[in-house]
Amino acid sequence: MTPQSLVITNGRLVLPSGEPAKADLRCQNGRIVALGAEAAPQDGDAVFDAGGALVAPGLVDLGVFAIDKPAFHFGGITRAALMPDQAPPLDHPARVRFAAQSGKPDFWVHPLAAATRGLEGTELAELALMREAGARAVSTGRRWIADSGVMLRLLSYCAMLDLVVVSHAEDAGITGQAVATAGEVATRLGLPSAPAEAESLAVARDIALAEMTGARLHIRQITTAKALDLVRAAKLRGVQVTAGVTPAHFMLSDLELVDFRTFCRFSPPLRADADRKAVIAAIADGTIDVIASGHDPRGPEDKRLPFADAEPGMAGAETLLPLTLTLVRDGVIDMARAFALLAGNPAALLGVNAGRLALGAEADIAVIHPTRPWIVNSDKMAASAGNTPFDRRPVEGRVLALWKGGARID
Amino acid sequence: MQPSSPSLSPDSPARSYPAGGLAFPHRDLTGIGQLARHEILYLLDEAEQWVELNRQSQKRADLLSGLTIINAFFENSTRTLLSFEIAGKRLGADVVNMHAATSSVKKGETLIDTAMTLNAMRADAIVIRHASSGAVRLIAEKVDCPVLNAGDGQHEHPTQALLDALTIRHALGLPKGSDLNGLRVTICGDILHSRVARSNILSLTALGCEVSVCAPPALMPAEIEVMGVKVFHDFDAALKGAQVVMMLRLQMERMQGQFIPSPREYRHLYGLSLERLAKAEAGALVMHPGPMNRGIEIDSQVADHVERSLITRQVERGVAIRMACLEVLTRRARQLPGWEPLGGENA
């Protein structure tokens, strides 16, 4: 069924560059067919009056752990790359094929193929067959591949297949059982901790191997100043490396761990405040390419536990957009760059024609009031669990309407 | 200029504790970190009467008669459990011990469910030991009665720090109300994994001690100096000027090459022998929370040294301190005059 043609009028379009400008947008057969003056409504078109709000691409969330449609739709997310850390892991073509279909039609899931069988980091999984089954990239999951030989062979193989490798950068030998970053807070709380250099070590190795093989490497989360410096330098050398982060690491520091708040247990863990500021600087200067939610709803059975026994992760889909908009409000980035981080860049990494308002792109569109205030309430979230570290925080920015492939999502 | 020996500070809070329940406005004892200096002193002073009682042949005081105390130990313990059990019984309470090894915890019940179960049995106080930092605080949030931390992971072991402070105070012949101002204490051993070290650092610095910690780098927590201690890796240097040397137990599994090449190599660098003890201040006192690895972190000649070792005296004060904590924390339930139920955050 082809959705009705649609014209969104009276909105301010967030285009790949420049300030949002007042213009109309027309979609037909699920694609954007006209922008600006040519987008006048034709007979039979549905017309949506945006009332001066932002008209932006639907968010493309690069790295989520669960498909949780109500939360994604609340957050303006129309596509998500699903991490292979499922039970069982996405290390088999049939599972990838199933996952790729699991959200349609109103939400598209782009499975990330497990790089190694069972995500064990030892034997390569059937990557070409999984690409055939719909995998858009390859991921090491929540773990780092400790064996450099395996990582080298993985990257060279993925360079041949032209698949991006999404890596988790924490040197497992250093992190061990750590649940916090070494420093005053972890010391006072007596939490198993590892130095922040566990990240830069892992990043250094992965960049060296990517440079050697010519593979495209995306480090899903970079959270420390030292690792960001490595990425910055590698990009200058022309290495095909990109970096992501979640709002937790630019909003919060490890001070949040006092009182053993398990909603602040993440992987990688929260860092010192200097690292948090370095992440913001890296978002500003372009070192960081992607902001993702890392959406991982976890109920009390996983979170109402002693800190070190709790599972990491947060339900982040609903707060991804408003927390990123704080960076716009604070003048760190402009609106166009915010949506490049949230939609354009991740879509490009996944190789999908979406994530931007351009002729021919998929009509995944969010109408957004960028300053509408609301209060995060973990008891009343759309997500399947309320594990947010931002409970009771006032935020700004709310999705008013959302379309996937030109079809309105209620 | 530092005084050469500790003394009662002119402004010691012991001279003027707040009245009634204001002297200890906490429902639980989750850590030394939650206590002000005068609250630590209050518990030490309350323990003095129980030290006296415990030396009588008739050791019963039936203050807690009719109350039920549950010792919920999710991690193995012999001396702390026994100490809490004796403390509760001497106060006349009904004491029940729950061992994780024989409980439904092994069947997959969550910690919260276990806590709710204990709560439903209407315990009047729950004493908890658990292998995870923060576990005691988590349980305290879910139950209606006072919770006492008997050791949570690598976080805190508050009654150990209190009994250590009381033992030092007695060994120095200081009266009730005294702090330990100016005393130089060196703590040596596996600081990284030690809740005893954390609680003692908090309590001893609060009481005015100059605390040094000594461990190989792999067993020293990051940024520990922010807790107000001097950091040493060289034991001889750490001992210089020490009036009290507190040795920590080193877990055997950490001496098999993970953190330390071998037990004998550990002894070579950090074992407290008589020769090494001579590098501390003349007459320096020796403590150990037990159980000891004799011949590894501490030599028998030191551990059994009649004038210098306080180790058995620590055990003795342990019962008195735990009696004081149980008695003080149950005052609200027993409706003592002036001990009204707590409101707000402490409730």
Image: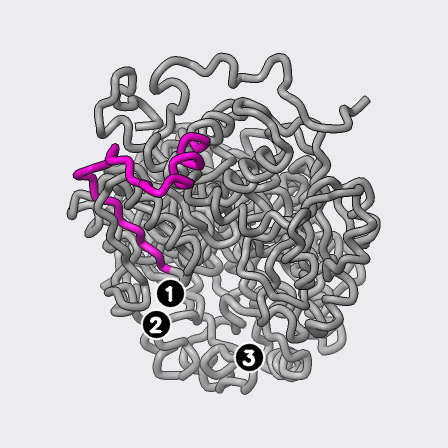
Q: Residue at x 79, y 46 (%)?
A: B280
Return the residue at label 3: A121
Q: Is residue A374 above or below residue A336?
A: above
Q: Considering the numbered disc 2 on the image, is that residue within a helix, a strand or a loop? A: helix
Residue A244 position, x and y percent, is 58, 55
Q: Considering the numbered disc 3 on the image, is that residue within a helix, a strand or a loop? A: loop
The tag earlier along the polypeptide, 3 or 1, is 1
Q: Chain of mark 3?
A: A
Q: Residue at x 58, y 45 (%)?
A: B198
Q: In this rendering, does residue A55 appear at all?
A: no
Color style of the picture: one colour
Q: Is residue B130 magenta?
A: no
Q: Residue at x 40, y 83 (%)?
A: A93
Q: Which mark is residue A99?
A: 2
Image quadrant in which you'd find residue B233: bottom right
Region of the chain picked out in magenta, as a range = B47-74
Q: Are marks 1 and 2 in contact (CB under 8 Å)?
A: yes
Q: Which mark is residue A109?
A: 1
| Relative side of B274 to A409, left or right | right
Residue A349 position, x and y percent, is 56, 63
